[in-house]
Amino acid sequence: MINFGYNINKSSRIDLDKDLNIAKKIVKIEPSFRTCIGCGCCTSTCSANNFTVFNLRKIQLQINRGELQSIRKEVEKCMLCGKCQMICPRGINTRNIILAIFKVID
Amino acid sequence: MIVDGKRKIWKDYQKEIPDDHYFYVRSCIRQNFFPASEVMFLKIMRDELACDIYENEYHTTCSGIGYHCDVVPMETTMTVIARQFALMTEAGYKNYAASCITSFGLYSEVIETWRHFPDLLKKIRKNLKEATGREFEIPEYLSHASDIIYKVRHDIAAKGKYRLINRFTGRPLKVVEHVGCHYSKMFPHKGIGGAEYPYVLAGMIEAWGGEVVDYPERRHCCGFGFRQYFIKANRGYSIANTHKKFESMEPFKPDMIITNCPGCPYFLDRWQYAIAEMEGKTYGEDGHGIPVFTYEEVASIVLGYNPWDMGLQVHQVAVEPLLNKIGISYNPEEKYKGFNNEDMGHPEKPVNLKTY
């Protein structure tokens, strides 16, 4: 095989029937997931984010985009302290969302 | 493919294509990649169809590649294009025919911009006058060369020696048509059939006896995308586009691909080699690739020209399987013979992609 100095990039195509089902299941368990505006307050106040690259805003974006490869590993960093829930301008039950992600991904 | 639905859409996107008297401008890169395509176009138009088609040796690049790579500013591009229009005006023509899809898209974009911003048009006229002393008129009709071949497709079929039919099975050849992005994705009304279902190549395939393959990634870009290819760090993205198209068309077992853009046949052809050598994957029959052609080459095949006179030997993917299927007679020994029967030398054989 020849190395031309570049590879064939992996496709970022999302299968709307398969990959977006996770978001639908989370909304069923915690309907407030749908009201997220992606402001990032949850991430800026997050204790886990102080020490790791845990980013709840990014997680909700990835779930809505069907990019699920790293979600399980990411949500494990959450300590369920609930500070994000206190600061959320939409009053989203973020702790329940984390628990819901565990349920539907497993 | 639901043909009735497509035909309704195609009806909404028709354009006027002049019958005769074209000012023809060549592409910068096609003459290197597929050297005889433009020659064959001129030959067909002049010798077969007796049309008046004029070329000017002072024509230059439209600067489209530089423009799309963000290195040439828009006003510079406009002035260069204004100079091409000035050449047309000086030659007494009003019907501008571009060989290149990028140029065609850029001419459409520039004319449309001038329509919306007349002050900018005045400024460009002034720039051109100061720089070259020339004056120009905007073309009355702007056509891509594939529009013209589309218009005369039935004449070509009537004069043709061959049809796109598999002589072993008697069935139409399965043809993938790939229309360049800049043909109608920017201005759907400038292309035959619009942006979603351009009919320009599909019409040729139907007229010449083939069957169009309707596969999921039919409208996907070939992967050239200018910056995606020219910057090496992005090249993996470029080949990924082509890879996605081939993965999508593979189950339909196409016999050939026909394109109307300078970059598309090049990338669909050469990336098959790169994919084969990087991953060992080939998409044609028995380790071959799927042969890729320009529309002028296919028109010339239909008309019965010698395959080696139209430059088919410079394709990366071997064209012989297709020539055999149609039943075209050719001499394999003449493949790498140039003018005066001089030997042009033989290319190195790839490891994974089978060639003749």
Image (cartoon, coloured by chain):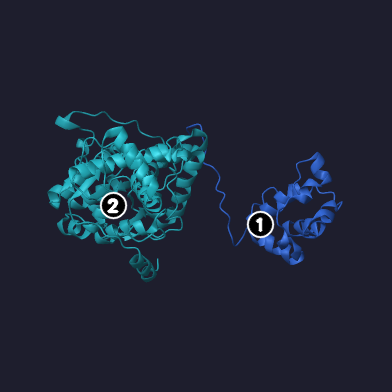
Chain colours: A blue, B cyan
Secondary structure, mark 2, is: strand
- For the question of whether residue B270 can be seen, the reply is no
Q: Position of residue B267 (x, y in %)?
A: 39, 42
Q: Disc 1 to disc 2, how far (Cα)?
A: 44 Å
Q: Chain of mark 2?
A: B
Q: Is residue B193 left or right of residue A41?
A: left
* Residue at 23%, 58% in the rendered image: B151
Locate residue B241 relative to residue B47 in the image: left or right. Answer: right
Q: Amino acid at mark 1?
A: Asn
| Residue bearing the label numbered 2 | B142
Q: Residues within 10 Å of mark 2 (few under 14, many from 20)?
A: many
Residue beneath disc 1 = A64
Image location of residue B220, percent across then percent down: 45, 52
B10 or B163: which is nearer to us?
A: B10
**In the figure, is residue B73 to the left or right of B305?**
right
Q: Is circle 1 on the same chain as circle 2?
A: no
The answer to whether residue B59 is above or below residue B202 is above
Q: Amino acid at mark 2?
A: Leu
Q: Secondary structure at mark 1?
A: helix
Q: Whole-percent x and y of residue B293?
A: 30, 47
Chain of the residue under label 1:
A
- Along the line of sight, the residue nearer the viewer: B24 or B136: B136
Question: Which residue is drawn at the image coordinates 75% and 65% (left, top)?
Answer: A31
Mark 1–mark 2 CB contact (< 8 Å): no
Q: Is residue B109 above or below residue B188?
A: above
Looking at the figure, which quarter contains the N terminus of chain B? Answer: bottom left
